[in-house]
Image: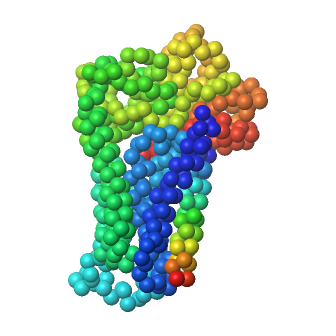
Amino acid sequence: MRRLFADRLVFATGVIVILMSILFALLRAAG
Amino acid sequence: MRLRYAVRGAAWVAIYLLFILAPLFALLAGSLPPARDFWTEFAIALGYSGLAMMGLQFGLTARFRYVTEPWGEDVIYHFHRQISLIAVGLVVAHALIIFATQPELLAPLNVIQAPWSARLAVLSILAVIALVVTALWRVTLKISYEAWHLTHIALAVVAITAGILHMVGSGFYLADPGKRVLWIGLTIFWIGLLLYVRIVKPLFMLRRPYRVSEVRKERGDTSTLVMRPDGHPGFRFSPGQFGWLTVWGSPFKITGHPFSFSSSAAVMDGRVEMSIRNLGDFTSAIDKVPVGQRVYLDGPYGAFTIGNPADMHVLIAGGVGVTPMMSMIRTLADQGDTRPVILLYGSRDWEAITFREELEALKARLNLTVVHVLANPSAGWTGEQGFITADVFKRHLPPPYADHEYFICGPDVMMDAIEKALSEMNVPLSKYHSERYSFV
């Protein structure tokens, strides 16, 4: 169960990092 | 205690994300090179994020007690393994998007003509892929744990060093001296964490050795090493915690092995005991360790420990998973604790029950009930048999089940089954504590 929590944390981290990478790219592409 | 751990856990998650995202967004500060299209910038961001995540892997395995405490070492290692797949995914996606948007870059992949930054990118990605393949399929590939451990560290250093040199060589964002210093500094910091674990900590341990004062044979093909600090006061631990043990060789040896302390934490002379089952690997030689042997202990670690205001402790052990429970029971007995303790203890058969006689004796000093569950009982056995299930809980525990604190240690398959059973009995997650001894 604790590992399930860790799995969710991994998933959330991945999603946050990808979203932030999109934000980074949008900020740059928009100049 | 639990709230403090929750706050600390949340703070560490925030710091973890900060270490990935702050250096990325720092690239947007100050003077900027000309903007490129969305996909190129997205790919670049994935590459930087992936590299930062790979670097932070050194932090996750650096055995910082303050970091691992809120989670437990087994969960940290589980996170380390799972997040590596995300990091590798980001790095590979970085390369694929770059090649999809700029196919002309594929040409320099010819190793003879390619610029060195491109070669380093290829080296980094190959090292990362080798890291994942050898980690996921080590047993299938028949790589010994020790050889894999050394290769794992070497590949990680190569992947990260080649990755940062690729970024520096590619120029663009890191053409800015400040940003270059930031990212190179971060890489040095990550690799410094590795040096801390592999050089600084072992140096400290070298000055604080232990001596084996007794090797006790236990039931269930298990031996107890009794170790005393040699020339120092030792450390205090909480019952249920574990340490990394190096029996043969120096503390600089790459592979240490985690074992729970089985002795009472109330002992004041620094003596610690570890009870180790013969699993056919290096553990088969534990019973031959000579008295007087110098050993090294790195610890204590782990969040799997009593010390809460529970009405009663329910300890659930499978096989050698009983060792942290023995530490808890011995400590509670030494402290004169009067709360009820129930040990549900799964073993192969009656003769293989490690600490069987001592558990009987401890009933005189503690409000202790021991329920043996035997997988292969003899013909006359009238007790519980098979595996520890929700039905076994209901037969031996007083309701309401959600009021007790549950401590579980055993093989993965048993722990999965127990966690499912407790969930079916509506025991909240906050009430059970577990440590998987197969986490490395």
Which image quadrant: the N terminus of chain B?
top right
User: Does B14 sit left or right of B301 as displayed?
Assistant: right
Query: Looking at the image, is B105 positioned above or below residue B349?
Result: below
Q: Nearer the viewer, residue B171 or B356?
A: B171
Residue B51 seen anywhere in this rendered image of the structure: yes
In percent of width and height, residue B349 lies at: 53, 27
Q: How is the image coloured?
A: rainbow
Vertical position of residue B150 compared to residue B296: above or below: below
Q: Measuring 41% from the left and 81% from the top, which residue is drawn there? A: B33
Q: For the point 25% across and 30% down, which residue is it?
A: B207
* Res B141 seen here: no
Decide if residue B234 is on the left or right side of residue B337: left
Residue B413: percent from left, percent from top: 56, 44
Q: Please name whichever residue, B422 or A13, is drawn nearer the observer in this view of the structure.
A: A13
Q: Residue at x 56, y 45 (%)?
A: B9
Task: Residue B143 in the image: state x and y as whole percent.
Answer: 33, 54
Q: Residue furthest bottom?
A: B104
**How far across and down, in percent of the image, does residue B414 sit?**
58, 40
Name the residue: 27% across, 22% down: B230
- Picture quadrant of residue B226: top left
Question: Is residue B394 found left or right of B49 in the rendered image?
Answer: right
Nearest the camera: B107 or B390? B107
